[in-house]
Image: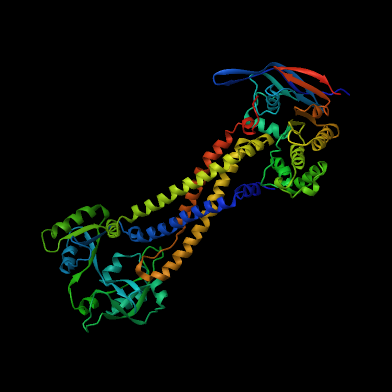
Amino acid sequence: MTYFRLLRKNLTRKKLRLFLTIFSIFTAFLIFGILKTFDSALNAGIELAGADRLITSSKVSLIQPLPFSHYTKIKATEGVANVTHASWFGGYYQEPKNFIVSFAVDAQSYLEIYPEIFIPQDHQENFLANRQGVLVGEALAQQYNWKVGDTFPLISSIWTNQDGSRTWEFKVEGIFSDPEEKFDTRSLMFHYVYFNEGRTGARDTIGWLVIKTESPEVNEAVSKAIDEQFANSPNETKTDTEAAFGKAFLEQFGNIGLIITSIVGAAFFTILLIAGNTMVLAVRERTNEIAVMKTLGFANGRIFTLIILEALILVLLGGLPALGFSWVLIEALKGAVGGALPPMTLTPEIFLQAIAYMVLLGFVTGGLPAFNAVRINVAAALGRKAL
Amino acid sequence: MTKKPLIKLEGVSKHYVKNKMSIDIFDELDLVIKENEFVAIMGPSGSGKTTLLNLIGGIDRPTSGTITFGGEQIDTFSESQLSKWRAANIGFIFQFYNLMPMLTAAQNVELPLLLTKLSKSERKEHVKTALAIVELEDRAKFYPREMSGGQQQRVAIARAFISDPKVLLCDEPTGDLDRKTAEEILKILQLLAKDFGKTVIIVTHDPEAAKFADRQLHLDKGKFFERKAA
């Protein structure tokens, strides 16, 4: 006999109740694991945001293009150190289900403004030299087994080519990565010049602009100056910091953070009630046994610790497999959705956050019954008359 | 050789307050129990027998008076001091056995040894010996529900003496057993007093059970009346 065996015996005395409680905890942490991973993936762009980067897009809508002339005008604005632009391509490979996050960019300035994108020197040189070249993210290259030198067609769901088709030919000139795993490497980028000359409509327009300011302190003044410059024109702009832009982009889908917090919060509150109720019942049923343990010399502190440990084990039995299963589901989901969603990974941060919640849950659900156990009046609990 | 006093109650009073009324259980009670004595405490219901046992076992405190054990005043101990003291000195035996239903006989007996520094193998050896004394070696792996009342009470006795306490406090230990089984239990308690030097105090309603004791005390209306053993 060991304390661990004693805990195990106490936990398993009502197997159906144990299973149902573990299952409810499992479900809650499964929801937590998946939603937090999803939330973290969606927020990856916000986390990536540079403090000195601003984004200018159409005031009407993010999908409304801006004239190319905005690029040169903004470049001349005071406080602006560098400007680049990007346009949404909406491409897929072979079938619509193989959706790929793809942009047409001003290559030179884009790479200057995003120094976190890592590209081997020779890849960068080759890419800049070839108008039909494409820079492919490491994860995307692995997915389709693309190597430098390969050519492949990409079909745009928006843009028609000069030949009347929506198929665009590209040559892989470089593969980029992000050692910090914040930039989406399941994406690709190619030259705006090739894109602009090739498309049949909306020529000389751009999707949005990325501005590097001289310092974060001038961000507010620069964004104000840009937006004032185009006020009352047919193409009014809206300039935000990159973080605010990323957040606004996500909010197109509703307040995802609030939705996730609400779901996780509701799940947690429910399991808190279930697990807490189970622990209170389990300890109340054992009032007599706890009293006997006290007569044997088990001190209050030891009994308190045993009950807290029991609650912790109960939560971990449900929570840890749920995290494992979340990981499996996320990995499977990655393959199934291709590039339609940002890269999802159950990060060590999410894992540690879940463990912290499990420990907290163990203490909260075990705390009250443990406190009650300490307060048990031995003589009364033994069912013996006091007289 | 004269036996030394082990437990001393001096001027012990116990009152309860129930529904704003003070109920006196006993007042100014004195009692001395010597080492290695087998004492039976009898008395009508409500006379305070169990309360007395609780006070001696440190699971209740007197309203006034002092209780000393081996020269140490225990009624002033803190809760944690009392826990340690009980683990070292007291073994409880109850009318309804109070075994842990999810543990086997051997595990129930081993439970108090978790509070000691004995190794796993030493604990196993102690359990084996304790079960042999109560003649239940062959039931070591049985759960309480798989044993008769008498067998369960023997397991409870083994659990009570396994950590080698000086005193065994037994509250109606035969109250739930038939005559033959009760006698077997009382003989074991007698053996523990005579051969193992334990001080045994039993609370009982049964005069036949009380006959196994060296000394019988009758508690009534807050006073003791002593009767010599037959």
Q: Position of residue B56 (x, y in %)?
A: 71, 26
Q: Which quarter of the picture shows residue A31?
A: bottom left
From the viewer's perspective, tell me whether residue A224 is left or right of residue A47: left
From the viewer's perspective, tell me whether residue B13 is left or right of residue A371: right
Residue B205 appears in the rendering: yes
Q: Position of residue B215 (x, y in %)?
A: 82, 23
Whether residue B120 is situated above or below residue A64 in the rendered picture? above
Q: Residue at x 62, y 33 (%)?
A: A381
Residue B117 appears in the rendering: no
Q: Which quarter of the picture shows residue B73?
A: top right
Nearest the eye: A105 or A125: A105
Q: Position of residue A329 (x, y in %)?
A: 46, 64
Nearest the eye: A265 or A205: A265
Q: Quick one: quadrant of the C terminus of chain A?
A: top right
| Residue farthest toward the bottom in the current orientation of the protein | A163
Q: Which quarter of the picture shows residue B96?
A: top right
Q: Position of residue B154 (x, y in %)?
A: 77, 40
| Residue farthest toward the left in the current orientation of the protein | A232
| Residue farthest toward the front in the current orientation of the protein | B178
Nearest the eye: A178 or A170: A170
Colour approach in the figure: rainbow
Nearest the eye: B222 or B193: B222
Q: Residue at x 47, y 53 (%)?
A: A354
Q: Residue at x 65, y 35 (%)?
A: A294
From the viewer's perspective, tell me whether residue A99 is left or right of residue B21: left
